[in-house]
Image (tube, rainbow, N blue to C red):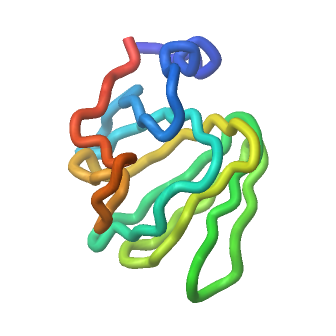
Amino acid sequence: MVVDLNEAYEQIDSYWDPHVAGELNDQHVKLARIEGAFDWHHHEEADELFFVHEGELTIRFREREDVTLTPGQFHVVPAGIDHQPVADEECRIVLFEPADTLNTGNVESEKTVREEKRIE
């Protein structure tokens, strides 16, 4: 299956609602449109890769310097590290993480997505 990112993002009509676009080796490739600040959280046993397709993403950290990503850049947040993704304007990201990873990690909130939609 070939995924055209520009077309795939048109299937996503809300922010902070990751959609599964592919799977490999028990990992999900997820697409999300984001804007504003997400919940502070961590993933106890899973690393999380953030890749920016369009826009600008800042990943805030409690214990170290923040990271700002622009199109074509990615950053891996190691397991167990508290972080908060923030986008001042709409940003389109790709996430790589284990298939069973909950988007809000160790936090339950209105942004928690238990059943992710899939890109068709």
- Apparent side of residue 58 relative to residue 19 in the rendered image (left or right): right
Which of the 4 image quarters holds residue 28? top left
- Apparent side of residue 29 relative to residue 72 in the rendered image (left or right): left
Residue at image location 34% in from the left, 67% down from the top: 43
- Residue 20 or 16: which is nearer the viewer? 16
Residue at image location 30% in from the left, 42% down from the top: 113
- Residue 96 or 87: which is nearer the viewer? 87
Count of marks overlaid on the render? 0
Q: Is residue 97 above or below residue 67?
A: above
Residue at image location 45% in from the left, 72% down from the top: 78
Place of residue 49 in the rendered image (x, y in percent of width and height, measured from the top left)? 50, 55
Place of residue 1 in the rendered image (x, y in percent of width and height, measured from the top left)? 40, 14
Place of residue 47 in the rendered image (x, y in percent of width and height, measured from the top left)? 40, 64
Residue at image location 64% in from the left, 42% down from the top: 35
From this viewpoint, which residue is outermost toward the front? 110
Place of residue 65 in the rendered image (x, y in percent of width and height, measured from the top left)? 70, 81
Q: Is residue 120 above or below residue 66?
A: above
Which of the 4 image quarters holds residue 109? bottom left
Q: Quadrant of the C terminus?
A: top left
